[in-house]
Image (tube, rainbow, N blue to C red):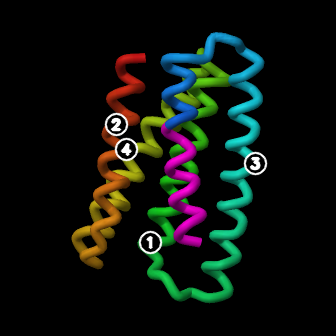
């Protein structure tokens, strides 16, 4: 699951960058978004099943991985597909704040430094959203 989570996280940023810099054809946006949607939804389902069956990882780590994948999904949908939807913008901002809060608790309570990735990702998405 850890490698799949890293794959989801690393797949998000090139798609976001390609949309920002390279892609001008709308059809490519849909193709990339739906590929990411399928991969991310599969990850969310597997994460929930894995957490309910094994309960090896902590609840905070589960919430961290879940909030990060949902934040990435909402960000791509509001950036690539529904560009003028104000409710998705609010959902994106709320999910970034939730991601930062969950990551902060993961760092402070469990001393797991992977939460730094969540804090930086949430802050970077908020900054890029502001400038878009």
Q: Residue at x 37, y 54 (%)?
A: 118
Q: Is residue 94 left or right of residue 25?
A: left
Which of the marked residues, 2 or 1, is nearer the chain's N terminus? 1
Q: Quadrant of the N terminus?
A: bottom right
- On the image, numbered disc 1 is attached to which residue? 61
**How dense is the environment of label 2, judged by Cα within 10 Å: few (below 14), some, or many (20 and up)?**
few
Q: Is residue 108 above or below residue 13?
A: below
- On the image, numbered disc 4 is attached to which residue? 122
Cα–Cα span, label 3 and label 1: 22 Å
Q: Secondary structure at mark 3?
A: helix
Cα–Cα span, label 2 and label 1: 20 Å
Asked if the residue at tag 2 contacts the one at tag 4, i.e. Cβ–Cβ closer than 8 Å, the answer is: yes
Rendering coords of residue 93 (x, y %)? 43, 36
- In the picture, the disc for residue 31 is none
Cα–Cα span, label 4 and label 1: 16 Å
Q: Is 25 contained in the magenta span?
A: no
- In the picture, the disc for residue 124 is 2
Cα–Cα span, label 2 and label 3: 24 Å
Q: Secondary structure at mark 2?
A: helix
Q: Residue at x 67, y 86 (%)?
A: 53
Q: Is 6 contained in the magenta span?
A: yes
Asked if the residue at tag 1 contacts the one at tag 3, i.e. Cβ–Cβ closer than 8 Å, the answer is: no
């Amino acid at each position: 699951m850890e490698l799949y989570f890293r794959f989801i996280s690393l797949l998000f940023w090139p798609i976001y960058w390609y949309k920002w810099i390279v892609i001008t054809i709308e059809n490519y946006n849909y193709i990339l978004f739906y590929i990411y949607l399928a991969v991310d939804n599969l990850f969310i389902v597997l994460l929930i099943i894995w957490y309910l069956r094994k309960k090896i990882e902590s609840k905070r780590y589960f919430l961290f991985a879940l909030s990060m994948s949902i934040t990435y999904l909402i960000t791509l949908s509001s950036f690539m597909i529904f560009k003028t939807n104000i409710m998705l913008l609010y959902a994106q901002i709320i999910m970034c704040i939730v991601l930062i809060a969950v990551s902060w608790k993961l760092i402070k309570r469990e001393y797991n430094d992977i939460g730094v990735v969540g804090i930086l990702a949430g802050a970077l998405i908020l900054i890029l959203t502001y400038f878009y």
